[in-house]
Amino acid sequence: MTLYPPPAQPQSSGTLRWVLIGIGAGLLSLVLCCALFAFGGWQLFSGLVDETSAMQQVVRDFMDAGRRQDVAAAEALFADAGGVSVSRDDLERLFSNRQLFREVEGMSLRSFNIRTDTEGGTAEIAGTLNYTDGGTQPFSARLLKEGDQWRLVRIDFR
């Protein structure tokens, strides 16, 4: 038996195809944006970790110079620019405090603020020095970036 008229076949419309292509393009764009955002965040975080590590190294080097009572090495850690004026007498007087300049095992930062502009960068860090004998010492420091090196402007121990 034959049915007349034959049942109508659904007409395939190009609209569905374009909707699926649009959804696919949107998802692809979303994935690419997320990947770029993640990569950019990783680069920023990685750079920040490198910068704070370099600043901490300057503080460690200063503490080592004080422990050795090496005034020349300590002077070399201070910035040439920025109106820094640290005399040899000031450093010798500071280094005479043997309780302050013991061997440092590590340090923890509780705050840091880095500002950069076209002429370089400045940083304020504060934290605690951890000595090998178990003692601790709070400190704060201001640093200036000269070229690609962080240099001390001031360092205070409370």
Image (cartoon, rainbow, N blue to C red):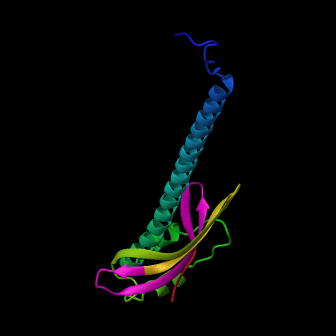
Residue at the image position 48 percent from the left and 58 percent from the top: 50
- The answer to whether any part of residue 70 appears in the image is no
Instruction: Work out whether 48 lies above or below 141.
Output: above
Camera-side residue: 27 or 125?
A: 27
How far from the left and from the top, in percent, is residue 114? 61, 66
Residue at the image position 50 percent from the left and 66 percent from the top: 55
Q: In the visual, does 69 lie left or right of 54?
A: left
Residue at the image position 61 percent from the left and 36 percent from the top: 23
Q: In the image, is residue 135 part of the stretch drawn in magenta?
A: yes
Camera-side residue: 79 or 126?
A: 126
- The answer to whether any part of residue 149 appears in the image is yes
How far from the left and from the top, in percent, is residue 109? 48, 75
Camera-side residue: 89 or 142?
A: 142
Q: Quadrant of residue 135?
A: bottom left
How far from the left and from the top, in percent, is residue 101? 39, 82
Q: In the visual, does 55 lie left or right of 70?
A: right
Instruction: Work out whether 35 lies above or below 88.
Output: above
Residue at the image position 67 percent from the left and 69 percent from the top: 82
Q: How many marks?
A: 0
How far from the left and from the top, in percent, is residue 92? 47, 83
Instruction: Work out whether 26 lies above or below 77.
Output: above
Q: In the image, is residue 156 part of the stretch drawn in magenta?
A: no
Which residue is the extreme one toward the left?
133
The boundaries of the magenta stretch are: 129-152
Which residue is the extreme one toward the right?
118
- Magenta stretch, main secondary structure class: strand
Which residue is the extreme one toward the top?
2
